[in-house]
Image (cartoon, rainbow, N blue to C red):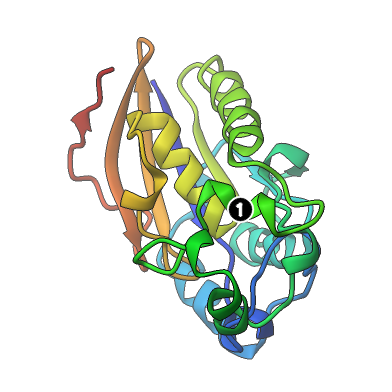
């Protein structure tokens, strides 16, 4: 049985300022983000993990380094990098929503049609595929506990691929330094928890997801 712990990076200034935080906004953590991740690190035992993977973006790598504390080799994987919002990256979210209201859902998340307006934006379908490819690879690892550091949209894509929820708009974005835990047992995915913000060792049993 493979256990996957998917962590969203800590806060950056673009998060704090309410800007669109995609692939091109490659910033380090701010002070609040470092505190969030350090708090998480103090509530986990990195020695219990077998492998650590991270998005290559600075905010994810820095989060992984704090959590890892020099114990494991940190493996960068481009499939974990945040969605590329094209020319929308780094722009104030409120201004973009006011200009293109039909590209956002009721929770103020982008809809798949956003690429009509955001030049060079990455499609949702492309993100789902690369995340699913990563999940399939992890499912072959055997009995391992794996820490994965990524981003908000990527965390939602993990949940969508694991549960086969048809509409990603029904999935909230995890908080900065929020954690999701999944199990894959004989090819069947289980969601143990989603968007926990403290203890990676929480052991409540998850429900199997079929379909």
Q: Quadrant of residue 206?
A: top left
Query: Which quarter of the rendering shows the C terminus?
Result: top left
Across and down, in percent, residue 102 comes to 49, 62
Across and down, in percent, residue 131 comes to 59, 34
146 left or right of 211 in image: right
Callout count = 1
- Work out whether residue 130 or residue 119 is closer to the camera in this orientation and state it: 119
Across and down, in percent, residue 84 comes to 73, 53
As drawn, 26 above or below 110: below
- Near mark 1 (Cα within 10 A), the count class, few <14, some 14-19 or many ≥20, is many
- Work out whether residue 198 or residue 156 is closer to the camera in this orientation and state it: 156
As drawn, 205 above or below 210: below
For the question of whether residue 183 can be seen, the reply is: yes
- Work out whether residue 75 or residue 41 is closer to the camera in this orientation and state it: 75
Location of mark 1 (residue): 150
Query: Which quarter of the rendering shows the N terminus?
Result: top left
- Work out whether residue 82 or residue 111 is closer to the camera in this orientation and state it: 111
As drawn, 108 above or below 204: below
Q: Quadrant of residue 196?
A: bottom left
**Residue plotted at (54% across, 46% down):** 112
**Residue plotted at (26% across, 41% down):** 192
Across and down, in percent, residue 180 comes to 39, 50
57 left or right of 53 in image: right
């Amino acid at each position: 049985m493979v256990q996957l712990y998917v962590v969203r990076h800590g806060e950056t200034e673009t998060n704090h300022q309410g800007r669109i935080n995609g692939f091109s906004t490659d910033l380090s953590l701010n002070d609040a983000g470092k505190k969030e991740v350090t708090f998480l690190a103090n509530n986990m035992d990195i020695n219990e993990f077998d492998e650590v993977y991270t998005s290559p973006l600075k905010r994810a790598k820095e989060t992984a380094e704090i959590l890892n504390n020099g114990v494991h080799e940190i493996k960068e994987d481009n499939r974990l990098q945040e969605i590329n919002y094209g020319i929308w990256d780094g722009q104030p979210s409120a201004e973009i929503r006011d200009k293109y209201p039909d590209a956002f859902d009721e929770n103020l998340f982008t809809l798949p049609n956003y690429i009509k307006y955001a030049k060079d934006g990455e499609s949702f379908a492309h993100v789902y595929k690369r995340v699913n490819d990563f999940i399939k690879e992890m499912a072959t690892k055997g009995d391992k506990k794996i820490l994965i550091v990524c981003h908000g949209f990527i965390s939602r894509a993990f949940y969508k691929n694991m549960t086969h929820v048809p509409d990603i708009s029904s999935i909230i974005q995890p908080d900065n330094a929020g954690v999701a835990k999944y199990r894959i047992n004989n090819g069947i995915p289980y969601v143990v928890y989603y968007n926990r913000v403290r203890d990676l060792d929480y052991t409540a049993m998850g429900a199997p997801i079929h379909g």
